[in-house]
Image (tube, coloured by chain):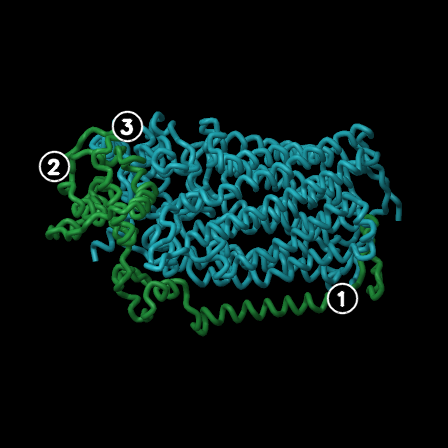
């Protein structure tokens, strides 16, 4: 026993005794403080309505000018689709379920309707850009198109046969940008910054004729020689 | 008053002690195995039963219910007899309790590796075992209350208050969280769906930590620490205040496992507020333990038993401070789904539960064998390898968690994710996983040395199966008391009733409105029940334990919606019996995986993840490509879902198999178009159907608007 201990109580449980020490004051104050904190916390968020709840917090993160009044845009209470907001495009451009409940993909109408003339792009040819494009390709594309572009699920990117477009650089960029949702290729425009996308496309463009081992059989039309 | 002679039952204590050590080593070995699988997936030897998804629940169940559970019973059976001055109520009940519990563990080990699981964390066991657990637990309760009834000590010591709250609350938690509809002997569906299921599960999960890993161990601490230190307990009043506040407040804190999820904000906030209020009651236990050692620190330096206890109690103080901090929104935003959670629980499990257990065993085994500890040197070795093991275990995981979380949230200057490829964030922390498994190995080494030391200790003595003791019987009614707590602690019935009332309140206030008030889960009209094939796929997902590594809960953060898609809504989960939100992202979230990749990608990915994502630590699942979908149980599954209120048309159970085959045919045809030939009755087809469905309901609703 130390100095300042309270008296020894006459409790004895199998030889265990108990002291009558007071609660340590700092401990008691800590307890009071946390209780007050807890009450204030609930008041702040749920009674006084001063703190943003999570959806409001999210909407502000997506759009600094967001005001609570705009939250009823969608039919789902408290949920505003980022698609409804300027400058915040959702990366999801994927298949919808067919009405029968199967997984047969349905063409996402908005993407396919506008068959405008593709914008014209020029490939990078400097080593640094191709190196960077290679890295991006390995991270994002190789899963379906193979480490060397030989094709696995996705088509062979090294031959002269193309399913979408004519194999020109601009056509490759367009396929990467828009994706081919019906075949499972997502639109990379919202995922990759334009610079990176063009670098990856340049790398793919540079693969033509490399003829890697285990190349997938040609698919689509032959273009060029 | 006549002095009565009676005998303490030490054999039952010995049995539980042996079980503690054996299951402890088994459970930790499984833990070490899955820790290594995280960087060397081939360690599963390509066997379904050895995959991470199945072994992880086995590890958690084994260390919680087999190791810590048997440790609790060892300590309770030893201490309660002496604190009450009575032999256990009934030797047969003691034996049924012991063998029943070991049977549950064996059944758990077998069924979990076979993939029979409810998927709810630390409650994975299927319904027949759930019933067995309830029965055995009630037998333990009867045995304990029977002993209390025939006690020769008027007042109940603080350890027993904690034991009583444990018995009552664990029964309540286990029974409510196991409300499930059996489909077959080894398959059931949770009666709750989505948000409600999540809240119920984490009310259970959090309070399993509270009333299985905290209150009983506080009881053990209150007996074995003053015994080993030979010092009086620091403060009787502190015991009273921290006991009642702890059991009352703990129950409310469950929702802190669901911060920034689809759980309504009000419930999340209650979880946060009560978690913060929990700091002082938890620290009350730590203080009463550490301050009991005042004036005995010279002894602590010498005695390995006290060393174990001091580090154990300190670990308790650390993790009960860390827990409330992790409940704060801004911290939880970083920590949740990362290895921070894993580090946090291991401070508690290895430090608090483990070290209190070993301290207790080193003290108690020599006593019941009437001998001395075989080797103090080996016990010290165990202490140091254990302590270093904990440090080597948790520090790398904290590092890993910060690194990965920051990588998940990092944006480029152009506003794109810096690390859009989830795998990159995993590969970054692989060295930390290697270091962590080294820490685990150290800890396990210490335990093995400890087991050997205890074995030689037991061998050097002989079991005093029945230890003689003498005390006077209690006579007459309980005395008039001047202090209220002296009154209640001499009336076990009153104490039990009030403890029960206090532990019911928090859960009732949170859960009943969640079940009954419709506005908590706004419905979304486009959300439809799963097709039979998707349901079959979902059951495969549950069987393989995919939820152990993949969440299905996109949090409302820009970094998550950019990576995964629209954040998850409560209304999307209304047909999810059980919910599958997960608690850790070793792989990416899957809530909006539907439609993201072609069917063939999933086929190839399940066959060999490394082929589609080089460097992936996900193991291959080739058997899904070979095994046939179980369509025999489909009608029963549909009927069970109908009972739970899932709106399948009447009589749909009879059309379900045809529906399943039709959808499977379409997927097989689709795969064929993509160059994969597979029969439409294979499990992979069902799993693809489920994965392609995930999160797509709400996309449909967007299109409709």
Chain of the residue under label 1? A
Task: Write down the colour of chain B.
Answer: cyan
Q: From the image, which quarter does the C terminus of chain B lie in? A: bottom left
Q: On the image, which quarter does residue A205 sit in?
A: top left
Residue A224, numbered label: 2
Give the residue at mark 1: A22
Q: Count neighbours of disc 3 (C-alpha within 10 A) and say few if under 14, some if 14 to 19, many if 20 or more.
A: few
Rendering coords of residue B172 (x, y %): 56, 49
Q: Is residue A49 visible?
A: yes
Q: Count neighbours of disc 2 (C-alpha within 10 A) and say few if under 14, some if 14 to 19, many if 20 or more.
A: few
Q: How far apart are the alpha carbons under marks 3 and 1?
A: 80 Å
Give the residue at mark 3: A213
Q: On the image, which quarter does residue B374 sit in?
A: top right
The secondary element bearing badge 1 is classed as loop
In the rendered view, tell whether residue B419 sits above or below residue B29. Answer: below
Q: How far apart are the alpha carbons under marks 2 and 3?
A: 22 Å
Chain of the residue under label 2? A
The secondary element bearing badge 3 is classed as loop
Supply the letter of whichever chain is green.
A
> Could you tell me which residue is drawn at 77 percent across and 54 percent down?
B155
């Amino acid at each position: 026993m130390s100095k300042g201990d309270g008296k020894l109580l006459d409790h004895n449980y199998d030889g265990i005794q108990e002291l009558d020490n007071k609660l340590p004051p700092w401990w008691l104050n800590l307890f009071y403080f946390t209780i007050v904190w807890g009450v204030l916390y609930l008041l702040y968020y749920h009674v006084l309505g001063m703190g943003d709840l999570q959806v409001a917090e999210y909407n502000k993160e997506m759009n600094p000018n967001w005001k609570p009044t705009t939250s009823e845009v969608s039919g789902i209470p408290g949920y505003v689709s980022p698609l409804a907001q300027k400058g915040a495009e959702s990366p999801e451009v994927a298949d919808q379920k067919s009405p029968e409940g199967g997984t047969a993909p349905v063409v996402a109408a908005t993407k396919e309707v506008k068959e405008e003339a593709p914008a014209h792009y020029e490939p990078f040819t400097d080593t640094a850009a191709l190196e960077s494009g290679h890295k991006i390709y390995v991270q994002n594309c190789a899963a379906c198109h193979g480490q060397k572009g030989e094709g696995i699920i996705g088509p062979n990117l090294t031959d002269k046969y193309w399913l979408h477009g004519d194999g020109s650089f601009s056509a490759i960029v367009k396929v990467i940008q828009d994706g081919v949702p019906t075949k499972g290729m997502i639109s990379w425009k919202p995922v990759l910054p334009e610079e990176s996308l063009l670098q990856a496309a340049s790398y793919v463009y540079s693969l033509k004729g490399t003829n890697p081992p285990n190349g997938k059989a040609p698919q689509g039309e032959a273009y060029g020689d | 008053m006549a002095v009565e002679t009676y005998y303490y039952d030490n054999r039952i204590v010995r049995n539980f002690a042996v079980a503690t050590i054996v299951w402890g080593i088994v459970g930790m070995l499984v833990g070490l195995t899955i820790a290594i699988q995280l960087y060397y997936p081939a360690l599963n030897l390509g066997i379904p039963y050895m995959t991470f998804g199945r072994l992880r629940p086995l590890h958690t169940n084994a260390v919680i219910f087999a190791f810590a559970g048997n440790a609790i019973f060892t300590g309770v059976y030893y201490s309660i007899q002496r604190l009450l001055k009575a032999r256990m109520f009934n030797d047969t009940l003691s034996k049924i309790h012991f063998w029943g519990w070991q049977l549950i563990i064996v059944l758990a080990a077998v069924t979990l590796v076979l993939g029979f699981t409810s998927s709810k964390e630390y409650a994975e066991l299927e319904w027949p075992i759930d019933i067995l657990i309830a029965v055995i637990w009630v037998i333990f309760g009867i045995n304990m209350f029977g002993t209390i009834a025939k006690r020769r000590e008027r007042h109940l010591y603080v350890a027993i208050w904690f034991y009583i709250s444990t018995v009552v609350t664990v029964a309540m938690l286990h029974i409510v969280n196991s409300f499930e509809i059996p489909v077959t002997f080894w398959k059931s569906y949770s009666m709750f769906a989505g948000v409600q299921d999540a809240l119920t599960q984490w009310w259970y999960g959090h309070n399993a930590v509270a009333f299985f890993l905290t209150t009983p161990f506080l009881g053990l601490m209150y007996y074995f620490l003053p015994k080993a230190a030979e010092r009086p307990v620091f403060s009787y009043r502190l015991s009273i205040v921290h006991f009642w506040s702890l059991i009352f407040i703990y129950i409310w804190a469950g929702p802190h496992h669901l911060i920034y999820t689809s759980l309504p904000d009000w419930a999340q906030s209650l979880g946060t507020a009560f978690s913060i209020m929990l700091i002082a009651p938890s620290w009350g236990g730590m203080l009463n333990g550490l301050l009991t050692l005042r004036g005995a620190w010279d002894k602590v330096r010498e005695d390995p038993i006290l060393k174990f206890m001091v580090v154990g109690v300190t670990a308790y103080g650390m993790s009960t401070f860390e827990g409330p901090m992790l409940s704060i929104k801004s911290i939880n935003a970083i920590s949740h789904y990362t290895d921070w959670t894993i580090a946090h629980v291991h401070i508690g499990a290895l430090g608090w539960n483990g070290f209190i257990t070993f301290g207790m065993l080193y003290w108690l085994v020599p006593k019941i064998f009437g001998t001395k500890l075989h080797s103090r040197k080996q016990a010290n070795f165990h202490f140091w390898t254990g302590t270093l093991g904990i440090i080597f275990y948790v520090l790398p995981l904290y590092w890993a968690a910060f690194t990965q979380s920051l990588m998940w949230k990092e944006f480029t200057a152009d506003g794109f994710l810096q690390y859009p490829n989830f795998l990159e964030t995993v590969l970054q922390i692989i060295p930390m996983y290697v270091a962590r498994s080294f820490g685990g190995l150290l800890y396990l080494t210490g335990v093995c040395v400890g087991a050997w030391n205890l074995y030689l200790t037991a061998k050097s003595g002989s079991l005093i199966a029945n230890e003689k003791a003498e005390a006077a019987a209690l006579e007459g009614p309980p005395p008039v008391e001047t202090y209220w707590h002296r009154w209640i602690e001499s009336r076990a019935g009153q104490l039990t009733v009030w403890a029960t009332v206090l532990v019911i309140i928090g859960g009732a206030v949170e859960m009943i409105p969640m079940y009954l008030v419709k506005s908590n889960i706004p419905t979304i009209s486009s959300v439809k029940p799963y097709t039979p094939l998707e349901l079959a796929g979902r059951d495969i997902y549950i069987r393989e334990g995919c939820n152990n590594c993949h969440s299905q809960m996109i949090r409302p953060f820009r970094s998550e919606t950019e990576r995964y898609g629209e954040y998850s809504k409560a209304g999307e989960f209304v047909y999810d019996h059980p919910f599958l939100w997960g608690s850790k992202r070793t792989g990416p979230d899957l809530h909006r995986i539907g439609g993201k990749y072609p069917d063939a990608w999933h086929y190839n990915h399940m066959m060999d993840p490394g082929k589609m994502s080089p460097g992936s630590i996900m193991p291959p699942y080739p058997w899904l490509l070979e095994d046939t979908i179980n369509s025999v149980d489909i009608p029963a599954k549909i009927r069970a879902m109908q009972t739970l209120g899932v709106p399948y048309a009447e009589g749909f159970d009879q059309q379900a198999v045809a529906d399943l085959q039709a959808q499977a045919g379409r997927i097989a045809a689709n795969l064929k178009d993509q160059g994969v030939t597979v029969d439409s009755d294979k499990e992979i087809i069902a799993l693809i159907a489920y994965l392609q469905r995930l999160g797509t309901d709400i996309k449909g609703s967007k299109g409709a608007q």
